[in-house]
Amino acid sequence: MLRRLDSIGLRPGKTVRKVSSQFMGGPVTVLIDGRQVAMGRGIARRVQVRILPSAPGGAR
C-alpha cells in the first residue's frame, strides 16, 4: 500500500483535498499537487489525515 500511495504522490506532510466519493463504495477522488487521483475505498479508508482550518472565503 505504501508503494501505491508514494506512486500517486501521497506522502506524509502533503496537502490533500477530497474532490468526490461515490455512494455505496465507489472510488474516492482526491487532489494532490494539482492532480486528481482516484483511489479505492479500501486504501482511502486507511489514509490518516489532519483536517486544516478553512481558508478565507470558505474554500478548503
Image (cartoon, rainbow, N blue to C red):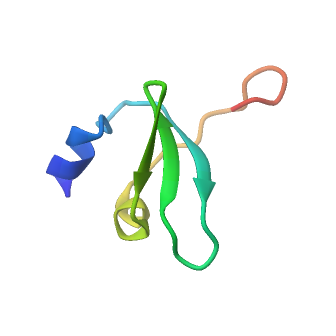
Image coordinates for residue 34, horizontal then vertical, percent: 48, 25
Q: Which residue does the image show at 30% across and 34% down from the upper left?
A: 9
At 52% from the left edge and 76% from the top edge, which residue is drawn? 25
**Residue 44 drawn at (x, y percent):** 41, 60
In the displayed structure, does residue 54 sit left or right of residue 8? Answer: right
Q: Looking at the image, is 48 positioned above or below residue 36?
A: below
Residue lying at the far bottom in this picture: please name it: 24
Q: Which quadrant does the N terminus fall into?
A: bottom left
Q: How many marks?
A: 0
Name the residue rendered at 29%, 40% in the picture: 8
In the image: residue 1, left or right of residue 16: left
In the image shown, does 43 or 39 lie closer to the viewer? 39
Corner quadrant of residue 37: top left
**Percent from the top left, x then y, of residue 19?**
61, 45
Q: In x, y percent, where is residue 18? A: 57, 46
Q: Nearer the viewer, residue 6 or 35?
A: 35
Q: Quadrant of residue 21?
A: bottom right
Q: Residue furthest top?
A: 56
Q: Residue furthest right?
A: 57
Is 37 positioned to the left or the right of 17 in the image?
left
Looking at the picture, does residue 30 appear above or below residue 42? above
Quadrant containing the C terminus in the rendered view: top right
Residue at 51% x, 50% y: name it: 29
